[in-house]
Image (cartoon, rainbow, N blue to C red):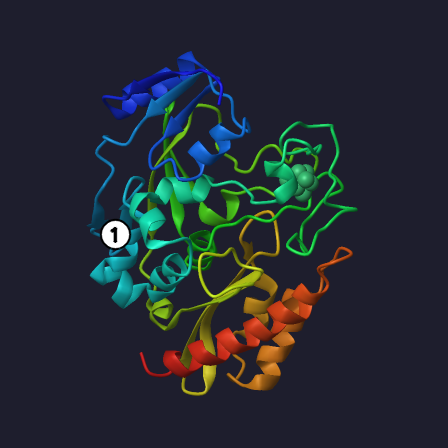
Amino acid sequence: MNNFTYTRATSLSDAVNQAVADQNSMFIAGGTNVVDRLKVFLDQPSQLIDISRLQMQQIELMADGSLRLGALVSNTAVADHSDIRRNYPILARAILSGASQQIRNLATVGGNLLQRTRCPYYYDTAFACNKRQPGTGCPAITGINRTHAILGASEDCVAVHPSDMCVALAALDAVVEVESSQGQRQIPFVDFHRLPVNTPQQDTNLEPGELITAVVLPPASFAKSGVYLKIRDRASYSFALVSVAAAVNLEGEQINAVRLAMGGVAHKPWRATAAEEFLIGKSADAIHFTQAAEIALQEAKPLTHNSYKIELVKRAIRRALTISAQAGGLV
Ligand code: SF4
C-alpha cells in the first residue's frame, strides 16, 4: 500500500470539491473492494475521501412510486427491506447470492456498482494487464480464461463484471443518480458500465469527480415475479460463472412484459433486449424460451476455456424464464 492522505467529507459538495481539487483521489465508503486493491497496489491514490458519514443512507418511496436507494445503504439493508422483498425480489435474491453476510453488512449500493473485475491477471501484478496499465497486453486472451467474457469483449480485455446486484438492476431499468461540482445528472443503468473496447481501464461512464448519490428503481409490476439464478463453482461466497435475472408477466397465456439480463458473460451486466422483444406477445412455453435463449447468445464468442458458458447460460435463461412465468401468472 502506498502512502496517501485521508480526509472525511463533511457534505456532498465538500466531497465532490475535494475530488476535483485532487484528481488522483478516490472516494471510500464500505471499502470492501477498494481496500483489497490498495493493498496490492492496483490503486495508488494520493488521497482517500471518506464519504461514509454523508446522508445517503435512506431508502425512500418517492411520490411517483419509485424507490430511491441512497448510495450508502448497505447491501444487507437493501436485501432486507420489506418493499424490496415484496416488489423487487429479484434484487434481494441477487444481493443475497453474493459475498458473505459480513461483507454485505459493509458493502454499499454505490460501491457495488464500482467494484472491479476479479480477473486473476488484473490482481496479480506479476502479469501485464491492459486494465491495470493500458498498452501492456492482456494475458487472459491466451491464458486461463474459463471465467472470462463471451459477449462484448475486445482485443484489449476479456474481463467480466463481478456484481450480482448490478445484473438485477440492469433488468429492473434502474437509474443512477450522480453529483459533481457541475450539478446532478441521471444515468440509465444499462449505460452506466462500459464495454472494454480499447479503454478497458475505464469500467463506467462516470466523469472524473462524479459521485454516485443514489440508485432509483422505477415502479414495475413485472418485477414481482423476478428470478435471479446464479451458477458458480461452489455453493456460497463465489462469483458467478454465469447468472440470469429474469422477470416475466403474463396476460392469460401471453407474455406482456419481460426483462432479461445476464451476469458473468461480459464487461458489464448484459441486458438481452433482442430476446425480450422476441418474447413479447408469445406464449410462455419451453419452445419460445429456448428460442429466446438462442437469440440472447447469438453473438457469443467463446475463448479457449469458456465455451461451456454458452450452453450453461442458455439453460439458466430457460430455467429462470420458466420459474418467473409460473410466478408471473399469479402476481
Ligand atoms: Fe487485464 Fe482485462 Fe486482460 Fe484481465 S482480461 S488481464 S483485466 S486486460
Q: Quadrant of the C terminus?
A: bottom left
Seen from the viewer's position, the closer of residues 147 and 26 is: 147
How many callouts does the rendering have? 1
- On screen, residue 24 versus residue 69, left or right, reads right
Q: Where is residue 190 shown, x and y percent of the image?
A: 50, 49
In the rendered image, which residue does mark 1 sit on? Answer: 77
Position of residue 256 relative to residue 265, above or below, is below
Helix, strand, or loop for circle 1?
Answer: helix
Q: Residues within 10 Å of mark 1 (few under 14, many from 20)?
A: many
User: Residue 121 appears in which quarter of the rendering?
Assistant: top right
Query: In the image shown, does 323 or 298 lie closer to the viewer?
Result: 323
Furthest residue in direction top, as rendered: 21
Residue visible at 21% across and 44% down in the picture = 58
Residue at 37 percent across and 30 percent down: it is 28
Name the one closer to the observer, 32 or 11.
32
Q: Is residue 216 visible?
A: no
Q: Amino acid at mark 1?
A: Ala
The image position of residue 291, as x and y in percent, is: 64, 77
In the image, is 293 to the left or to the right of 249? right
Residue 298 quadrant: bottom right
